[in-house]
Amino acid sequence: MTPILQYLTDRLFLLPLALLPHHRLSRVVHRLARSENRAFSQWLIRTITSVYQIDCSLAEEPDLSTYSSFNAFFTRSLKTGVRPIAAGEEIVVSPVDGVVSQCGPIMRESIFQAKGHQFNLTTLLGGDQGRAAPFTNGIFSTIYLSPRDYHRIHMPMDGTLREMIYIPGRLYPVNNPSTRSVPGLFARNERVAAIFETSAGPMAMVLVGALFVGSIETVWAGEITPPQKKFVTTWKYPKAPITLKKGDEMGRFNMGSTVILLFGDEAVDLHDSFSAGMAQQMGSAIASIPG
């Protein structure tokens, strides 16, 4: 497909999406996903499993009939050992199952989204320049989770939580047509950012919402959204720090979305096997802390 035809195709795909009531539709999906009407939930589970060819044998509970709702299935846990965590204090691991959308250096405050598009670091983290400063000229990675992926999010390395930020926004899809066409996509969508102190310095994990992904939660605070908030909201944890080990669960999505990792300048070295377009499994080594 020629670049011009690709551009026109993407724009035609996104035009109706821009006019949709993103949050209203996502609230409807949120309710449906949690419906415990057995006939409906089992039909939805089996349909999605078939369409996306989900390998249910990896689930801690592989029997689909035991799930009370679609959301219970979608956020299922995995069997012990099927996602081994790469060993070594200097090793950073993938927080999720997914595909690397982009990764590499942050150019001052500019983060690469797709050809012709970047998004701003400070905007991504809620507009606070002091919060963004440790990541200026740093390292980023963007990992996309499709509906077929495991949807719990884990720690890439040991970290102590310092701050969590909710940033309101739209809920555009985060698939390839969207990243190619929506300027500043990840800094426009609703998101939750968690800032950790680690042996590599500050690390940010940004959980980006998307169309039909109106639910983002963390293990320490539960469901952050919904409901949608109108303003940036911040929680700090100076007196009762929360420390999570590498591989510990830190949050989850309802439906597919994106996780963005941020590190400081020269804080980590990304591995050659971790590059745009590469599939990753949670727990696989993606970077190392320089010795």
Image: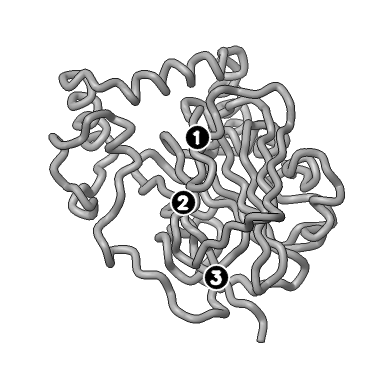
Image position of 204 with respect to 91: above or below: above
Mark 1 highlights which residue? 223
For the residue marked with disc 1, what is the amino acid? Glu
User: Mark number for residue 23?
Assistant: none
In primary-sequence order, the first of circles 2 and 3 is 3
Mark 3 highlights which residue? 92
Mark 2 vs mark 1, foreground winner is 1
**The one of 60 and 117 positioned closer to us in this rendering:** 60
Q: Residue at x 55, y 67 (%)?
A: 157
Q: Tell whether 43 sits left or right of 269.
A: left
Mark 2 highlights which residue? 153
Q: Residue at x 63, y 58 (%)?
A: 241
In primary-sequence order, the first of circles 2 and 1 is 2
> Which quadrant does the C terminus fall into?
bottom right
Residue 96 seen anywhere in this rendered image of the structure: yes
Look at the numbered disc 2 and give the secondary structure of its residue: strand
Image position of 48 with respect to 89: above or below: above
Image position of 84 with respect to 224: above or below: below
